[in-house]
Amino acid sequence: MSQPRSSYAVGTGLFIVLGFAALAYLATQTSSVANVHQGDSYTLDTQFTNIGQLKERAPVKIAGVRVGQVKSITLTPGHEVADVKLSIDKTYDKIPQDSVATIFTSGLLGDQYVGIQYGSAKQVVAAGGTLSRTKSTEPLEEMLGKFFGAGSVVDNVGGSYMVKADFSNVGALSVGAPVKMAGVVIGSVQSVHADPVKLNAQVVLAIDKRYNAIPDDSSAAVFTSGLIGTQYVAIQPGGSPDALKDGDEMILTQSAMQLEDLIGKFLVNGSPNDKKDAGNGKSSDTPAGKH
Amino acid sequence: MTQPDRQPPDDSTLVRIRGLTTVLNGKTIFDALDLDIPRGKITAIMGPSGTGKTTLLKHITGQMRPDAGEIRVNGENVADMSREQLYKMREGIGYLFQNSALLTDFDVFENVAFPLRQHTQLPEVLIRNLVLLKLQAVGLRGAAGLMPNELSGGMARRVALARAIVFDPMLILYDEPFVGLDPVALNQVLKLIRTLNQTLGITSVLVAHELEAVKQIAEHVFLIANGKVVAQGDPKTIANDGSPWTRQFFGGEADGPVPFQYPAGDYAEALGFSGAAK
Amino acid sequence: MNVREPQRNNVVTQSLAQIGACGLFLVTLLAAIPRSFRYVRETIRQLWFVGAMSLTIIMVCGLFVGMVLMLQLYHVLSIFGGTSASGMVVALSVYRELGPVVTALLFAGRAGTSITAEIGLMRATDQIDAMEMMAVDPIAYVATPRFLAGLIAMPLLCCVFCAMAVLGGHLVGVTWLGIDNGTFWSNMTAEVDVHTDIVNGVLLKSLAFGAVVSLIAVFQGFTTPPTSEGVAYATTRTVVASSIAILALDFVLTAFLM
């Protein structure tokens, strides 16, 4: 007679195997397990003054190759440095004692990782030993913040007075965008429209009455907060004894910069530690906050 | 085959029903019904549609519990049984459903083998032989490989019968076994019921309307109406006993104790002639 | 087995009665699990019908979901110059949401309806009563194996769905749109976490959905009036109730697991 039972069993078995194969594929090939070394590892202690966005299980790399992961991040009370334990694969047990552990960011927006640059000492750091030479993270926000002078505190704007400014290019500046001085919001953009005669953009800034002593030779610039944030107007105080009044026009302006050019130059020109002037030269002004 | 000898001594009654009372959805189906089914005979239960003949079978198998009264099958009260006891008892009862109720997932062979596979750990060879034996008995050994949807109504009923007897039960309940069969198939089923009863000594209870068929095989007939047994006896005497019930039922009159009209309010009133009615 | 249809008072009491009956039915089902161990073969057979027979639709749909997701994401992410992250976003959205939810919806449509219709028909043709008469517990033999099969099949199907979606994303992203193969995988492996995404997302959610869908399907099959209209009505209800339950449960699970 017919024996359907065995064929069902075989088919069902195949189905279960396929399902588990898919699970194994998901778990090992598309997840972070793919990055985790299953082999033996040893622990190294390091200390950083600032770990930025570093997380546990973040990769540890030598020459860009993953050799382990961050085991734990702790902060001892009373200390102002973070203790970071690195778990490193046993295969890589010849790390010189004077090697430098640095916190890097993968790409512009990526996660952070610990990179170890080999030193030249003959002595090898032992398991459980300490890498004393470390370089902490320089948060990208700080860098960019310095660079662009962006603040983020928004004040309530009370009574205000109007100041006009002409820009050759306002980028994506919109009505309502903040006006900042030294990174602090002091007003907002009242209107943006093109001047039919001068063929440029005329921006009306509403500035809080409290800030009534802004020198009339101050400059206005269109900046971007953060990398992909909104644009705002930054006011760079000048040295004139006379203050801006309602209806005045600001003469010195700096138009919106091409962010792509800027970052391109910035990244190509060297490490973040290079205090290099990266203004794009459209105006003689240096960007706000940069001295 | 696996039937232990459960017969209590000196008892010719296999199923004894006393004071059976059942109320379904507010309607009284049985009202203190008393009924004895003799061992080793073919008993027919007849009655107008809706008198609960199928319900009575369900009571005997314990699928429905009565509101009052007792049903003793082989001396044990079905109403008091636990699920395990019920299942144990049902292994000794065959039940032929009106629409055969073959499992559509399995072919004829597996349908007949189903009770064996569920309740025994017999080797495959033995199962095969037993199933073929039963299929041979109903004349369908050649149809073993067919699926239920390939069978005619009569064939399906015979397969169901083979399944019902695969455990050699002490009792078979037939729920309307002749409905929807052509004369040939009807006679085949009739012959099977009689053969099974005579050769294996299986007590048979059949619920049926077909007077001619029942007269041919039944040794005892119960006529049930209004929740009570209104007449009983062997088919010939009962047909001639002259009570209004038997006259209407066996004579096939449209009106009588079984009313033509379903109970309703005053007709004239329903038509809006309430004034005229008064 | 004779569950009477609840009184048609109004939608709320009716739904509540259904939910309550469904809960009680779940208890019956679970209580029958020890008794259904002897019907392991039946569970395997049901796993074949419920799981293996659903593979084709799950695989095809998974592939297309991955492909269309990649296409959409690529165009949105290209605005921010983040196309390299699209593989990762495909994987995360499929693992956490789309995989379990879409698989469960397809499962309800493909397997749930057939379970309901099959049980409904078995009741209509007295097969369930016949089992009772053959001393075979229909709950242990019919209901629980189907429930267990659904419970086992769903996570497996969901894994297959997710794997196919990632492959679909790879197909469109790498082969067609030209995302670098290494970038595609490295971004994915960097962000997908086994615990939060695969265990909590794929497995736990699909297990819960599998339980809910097969419970509803079996329940509807067992409680529907055993007539043609009853069965037709019950299959519709299976799809509607399952879909609502899946999406509502998804919200609850996401809130708890994230």
Image (cartoon, coloured by chain):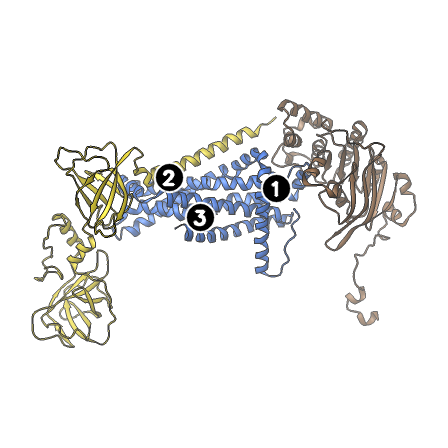
Horizontal arrangement in the rendering, residue B273 relative to residue C253 (left or right): right
Q: Nearer the viewer, residue B79 or A189?
A: B79
Residue for badge 1: C139
Q: Which chain is blue?
A: C
Q: Quadrant of the C terminus of chain B?
A: bottom right
Q: Amino acid at mark 1?
A: Ile
Residue for badge 3: C101
Q: Nearer the viewer, residue C19 or C10?
A: C19
Query: Residue A190, percent across and down?
Result: 22, 71
Q: Amino acid at mark 2?
A: Leu
Circle 2 — which element?
helix
Lower position in the chain sequence, tag 3 or tag 1: 3
Is residue A244 among the parts visible in the rendering? yes
Q: Amino acid at mark 3?
A: Val
Which quadrant of the figure has residue A67? top left
Of the residues tagged 3 and 1, which is closer to the observer? 1
Query: Residue A32, percent across and down?
Result: 32, 41
Query: Residue C207, percent across and down?
Result: 47, 44
Q: Which chain is yellow?
A: A
In the figure, B226 relative to B158: above or below? below
Circle 3 — which element?
helix
Horizontal arrangement in the rendering, residue C175 relative to residue A80 (left or right): right
